[in-house]
């Protein structure tokens, strides 16, 4: 069973997992979860399997989000997380839990506020070529529209200080949330010190929820709408007075 421990380098660490029918993946996540994690928040997004039961058996905090969508689930989980630093990953067991302390060390020791993880070229098995191509297309349009480079715009593993949430305008309730959080964090260079670092990536447990063509085109159109300012402003996930950005290192 997962149990919270002492804070990691004086920082409380929360792990947020959005889950839709992840009864096969969750045991893998908890199997080798490092002791640096103080809190696990599992967001149940209308699961019909044993996701909730398994999460509770491992000692996770379970919250429910009835609005179907990756972004909707994440927004609920990020509001509920209490850590000074939040780690995110999917509940399918694909992301490396043993990288969490490494990423925390880089963030804390080097003074970063946001780290996103790059899976490209670091998978233990060949990936679906269509997914790789789609990711590359979205990366290209991010460079074209927003003038910064990211190698893996669709990665679901990020590590960031909770305090930056008040600076992020996160509008998407769907799969585009993943690229939007990177756009928001990595484009605010005067406020947020961001970095992309490589990780390895495993075969998932359970059935993929990604609809490649539909989600791919939706994410592409989302980039244009975001660039043209058509999405408006979303309510901040935390209030303005909830923590301040750490002083930036030179």
Image (cartoon, rainbow, N blue to C red):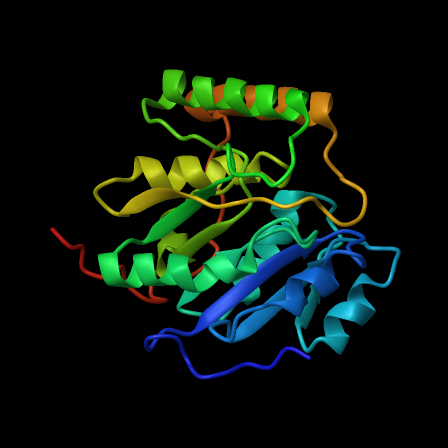
Instruction: Between residue 106 and residue 77, name the one nearer to us.
Output: 106
Q: Residue at x 68, y 26 (%)?
A: 128
Q: Position of residue 137 (x, y in %)?
A: 52, 17
Residue 84 is drawn in which quadrant?
Answer: bottom left
Q: Position of residue 8 (x, y in %)?
A: 39, 75
Q: Position of residue 56 (x, y in %)?
A: 74, 74
Q: Position of residue 160 (x, y in %)?
A: 40, 55
In the image, 78: left or right of 47? left
Q: Residue at x 72, y 34 (%)?
A: 210
**Which residue, as the protein is rendered here, is positioned at the far right?**
48
Instruction: Between residue 160 and residue 131, name the one nearer to us.
Output: 131
Above or below, 202 relative to 9: above
**Which residue, as the protein is rendered here, is positioned at the far front?**
124
Q: Is residue 161 visible?
A: no
Q: Residue at x 59, y 24 (%)?
A: 132
Above or below, 114 relative to 34: above
Q: Is residue 75 visible?
A: yes
In the image, 85: left or right of 76? left
Residue 146 is drawn in which quadrant?
Answer: top left
Report how many numbered discs are placed on residues in the image. 0
In the image, 151: left or right of 42? left
**Which residue, as the protein is rendered here, is positioned at the far left?**
250
């Amino acid at each position: 069973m997962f149990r919270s421990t002492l804070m990691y380098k004086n920082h409380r660490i929360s792990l947020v997992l959005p889950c839709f029918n992840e009864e096969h993946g969750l045991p893998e996540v908890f199997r080798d979860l490092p002791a640096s994690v103080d809190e696990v928040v599992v967001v149940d997004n209308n699961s019909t399997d044993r996701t909730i039961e398994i999460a509770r058996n491992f000692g996770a905090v379970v919250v429910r989000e009835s609005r179907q969508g990756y972004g909707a689930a994440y927004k609920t989980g990020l509001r509920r997380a209490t850590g000074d630093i939040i780690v995110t990953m999917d509940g399918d067991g694909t992301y490396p839990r043993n990288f969490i302390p490494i990423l925390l060390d880089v963030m804390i020791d080097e003074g970063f506020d946001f780290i996103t993880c790059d899976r490209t070229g670091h998978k233990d098995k060949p990936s679906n070529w269509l997914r790789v191509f789609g990711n590359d297309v979205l990366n290209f349009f991010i460079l074209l529209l927003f003038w910064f480079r990211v190698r893996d715009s669709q990665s679901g593993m990020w590590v960031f200080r909770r305090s930056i949430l008040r600076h992020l305008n996160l509008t998407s309730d769907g799969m585009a949330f993943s690229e939007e959080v990177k756009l928001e964090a990595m484009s605010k260079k005067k406020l947020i010190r961001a970095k992309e670092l490589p990780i390895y990536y495993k075969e998932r447990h359970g059935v993929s929820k990604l609809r490649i063509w539909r989600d791919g085109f939706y994410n592409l159109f989302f980039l244009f709408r975001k660039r043209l300012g058509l999405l408006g402003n979303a309510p901040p996930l935390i209030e303005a007075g909830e923590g301040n950005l750490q002083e930036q290192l030179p």
